[in-house]
Amino acid sequence: MRPQSFRFFFFVVLTFVGTTLSLQASASMVPRAPQIDARGYLLMDAASGHIIVEHNAEQRLPPASLTKMMTAYIAEAELQKGNLSEDDMAPISVKAWKMGGSRMFVKEGTRVSVGELLKGIIIQSGNDASVAMAEYIAGSEDAFADLMNQHARRLGMNQSHFMNATGWPAENHFTTARDMAILARAIVRDFPEHYDIYAEKEFTYNGITQQNRNLLLWRDESVDGLKTGHTEEAGYCLVSSAKKDGMRLIAVVMGTDSEGARARESQKLLTYGFRFFETYKAYSAGDILDTAELWMGDKDQVRLGLAEDLVLTIPRESHENLKAEVTVNPQLQAPINQGEKYGTVTVRMNNELLVEKPLVALESVEEAGLFTRLWHHILLFFKGLF
């Protein structure tokens, strides 16, 4: 079976210059990324996971209340699994009630619904709500921190370590801009049924109305999340997400010098990403990319494709000079198991490899009867001679 090639009409050149990503294209002019006044920052395409811009994205930094994204993620995971209900009433401990900093203003000795606590964590950035949620889920905040670190490892947040559910300054409590983008992408992807909370501009509890501290929710209608953070050590931080024309971007800025600066620098990243890049789906999961000859099977052929979408981030209006090649393993023989790898799909530009994905069977094929298998053995023997 000869490899088959598929051409798409876009052109991508990846060139790292200093701390920014510069792309040149024959049909699209892309300027160098804007300068961002932050200790660490990153811009990601949520669909492809491609990093468009980054600077000090692997530097360990204090996350402040960005920590609460992980607290909310775990609560959302427990809700999805059915271990929690939004109507569950969580008890408020003395520890939760006494928390300083930003608060939901829950009262010690009362019970608050999980649904209200989740809004208190996300919208009001309540330290008291975060501790109450942690204690309700894991029994104690220390045990919950261990759960946070387990989820971080599972998600690939390899440069993060959490000591508490709030982001209260603590030794050995750190993350990176890259890890925060990974977490934001997981929140959007894994729990769409709860994501609307991140766009809510205010929440009232106990007669007290507090506004979401994410200024971009008022300034840019495409922005629908996620979380702010601030301590003296961390500076002003913001993880934001926005969706426009079918493209979702995630921007992370850490260590700016004011509330206005974190919004302004995040807006620079989002504007740059939407202006000059687009999300391009080359193939969808389940598309038939090849129908390969098959030996020893009760079928003569097997359909091959991708187990997941193949999505790229490319400069706008630059659909040319990209080549996708499908390579199938030689002399496929039954049994064939659906989902197993039987080749590769590679995407290149000017002989430079951009992405490689496994080519998998889209169906299972059983072995043929004894007579057919013997006949195929004979044919393969003589085929091998020539």
Image (spheres, rainbow, N blue to C red):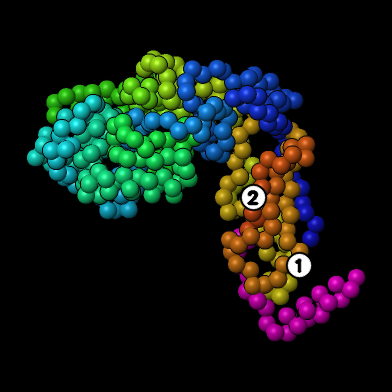
User: Is residue 335 depicted above or below 257 in this figure?
Assistant: below
How packed is label 1: few (under 14 Cα within 10 Å), some, or many (20 or more)?
A: few
* Relative depth, front residue between 150 and 2: 150
Say which residue appears at 45% left-offset and 33% top-offset. 60
What amino acid type is highlighted by mark number 1? Answer: Gln
Residue at the spot 65% in from the left edge and 21% down from the top edge: 30
The image shows residue 286 at horizontal and vertical percentages of 59, 53
Image coordinates of residue 352 in percent, x first then y, are 74, 39
| Kind of residue indicated by mark 2 | Lys
> Residue at position x 31%, y 34% from top?
170
Q: Name the residue under label 2.
A: 357
Q: Disc 1 designates what residue?
A: 331
**Pick the front one: 383 or 16:** 16
Magenta-highlighted residues:
361-386
Q: Nearer the viewer, residue 79 or 51?
A: 51
Q: In this view, does 111 lie to the left or right of 360?
A: left
Q: In this view, does 17 lie above or below 166?
A: above
Query: Farthest left residue?
Result: 109
Farthest residue in the right direction? Answer: 386
Q: In this view, does 165 lie to the left or right of 108?
A: right
Which residue is at a point 35% across and 26% down the rendered structure image?
A: 229
* Residue 283, position as x, y percentages in the image: 63, 45
297 or 154, nearer to the observer? 154
Quadrant where the image shows the C terminus: bottom right
Name the magenta segment's main secondary structure.
helix
Q: In which quarter of the image is residue 282?
A: top right
